[in-house]
């Protein structure tokens, strides 16, 4: 199995956290790739027309992309239960969608401040995206995360880790003490520690 990856990508991190939790991480060859929204990677586009990471090449030749699809494949391969069944499945998928949405908004805010030339930056756009992040954090604060380990909590964990990595001045913990306490434990799982961006 092969994975086109960027070590700073929170979506790649989500895949690798699931792989670590399922004991599959050492079976995945990681292919470093530069996936940028403007200058897309030809090496990735050969397999994924979107040119994005994570792009996953299974041993049987199937190509998968979008972190949730890759995670579901790994969950099936490893006999896991990250997606659950019945009502838990819908909760897990909805939480994963919330976490992915928060990550998407954070990435758009980051691109606007780092990639767009300064004279062209749109402060309203940045504020709108960070508003989505704030609202997602508010919903997480209401959730009963406990000791859950599923695709929803993995996505939340990777999202919170990305905020710490790329938005260190955001201070999301101050207004979300319950989420902060949960992440203080979840963020130290071996799978999270092994995938933490430098």
Image (cartoon, helix red, strand yellow):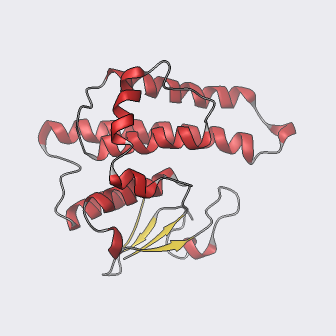
Instruction: Please provide percent x and percent y for residue 51.
Output: 57, 65
- 176 or 12: nearer the eye? 176
Q: Residue furthest right?
A: 119
- 23 or 87: nearer the eye? 23
- 95 or 165: nearer the eye? 165
What residue is drawn where x is 25% and y is 26%?
144
Q: Residue furthest top?
A: 175
Give the quadrant of the C terminus: bottom right
Compared across the picture, whether 41 is left or right of 94 comes to: right
Instruction: Please provide percent x and percent y for residue 58.
Output: 34, 75
What residue is drawn where x is 46% and y is 58%?
12
Compared across the picture, whether 66 is left or right of 76 comes to: right
Vertical side of 109 occupied by 46: above or below: below
Q: How many marks?
A: 0
Instruction: Please provide percent x and percent y for residue 2.
Output: 42, 75
Instruction: Please provide percent x and percent y for residue 15.
Output: 38, 58
Question: Image quarter for residue 106?
Answer: top right
Q: Residue furthest bottom?
A: 60
- 138 or 52: nearer the eye? 138
Compared across the picture, whether 38 is left or right of 65 comes to: right
Question: Image quarter for residue 191?
Answer: bottom left
What residue is drawn where x is 46% and y is 38%?
160
What residue is drawn where x is 36% and y is 77%?
1
Query: From this viewpoint, is residue 68 visible?
Result: no
Query: From this viewpoint, is residue 39 visible?
Result: yes
């Amino acid at each position: 199995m092969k994975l086109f990856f960027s070590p700073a990508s929170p979506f790649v991190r989500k895949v690798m956290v699931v792989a670590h939790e399922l004991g599959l991480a050492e079976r995945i060859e990681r292919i470093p790739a530069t996936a940028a929204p403007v200058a897309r990677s030809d090496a990735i586009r050969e397999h994924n027309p979107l040119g994005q990471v994570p792009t996953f090449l299974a041993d049987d030749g199937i190509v998968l992309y979008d972190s949730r699809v890759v995670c579901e494949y790994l969950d099936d391969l490893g006999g896991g239960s990250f997606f659950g069944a019945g009502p838990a499945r819908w909760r897990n998928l909805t939480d994963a969608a919330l976490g992915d949405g928060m990550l998407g908004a954070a990435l758009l805010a980051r691109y606007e401040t780092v990639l767009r030339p300064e004279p062209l930056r749109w402060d309203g756009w940045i504020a709108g995206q960070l508003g989505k992040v704030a609202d997602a954090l508010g919903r997480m604060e209401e959730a009963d995360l406990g000791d859950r380990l599923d695709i929803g909590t993995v996505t939340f964990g990777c999202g919170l880790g990305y905020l710490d990595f790329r938005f260190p001045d955001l201070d999301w913990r101050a207004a979300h003490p319950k989420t902060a306490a949960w992440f203080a434990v979840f963020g130290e799982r071996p799978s999270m520690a092994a995938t933490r961006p430098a």
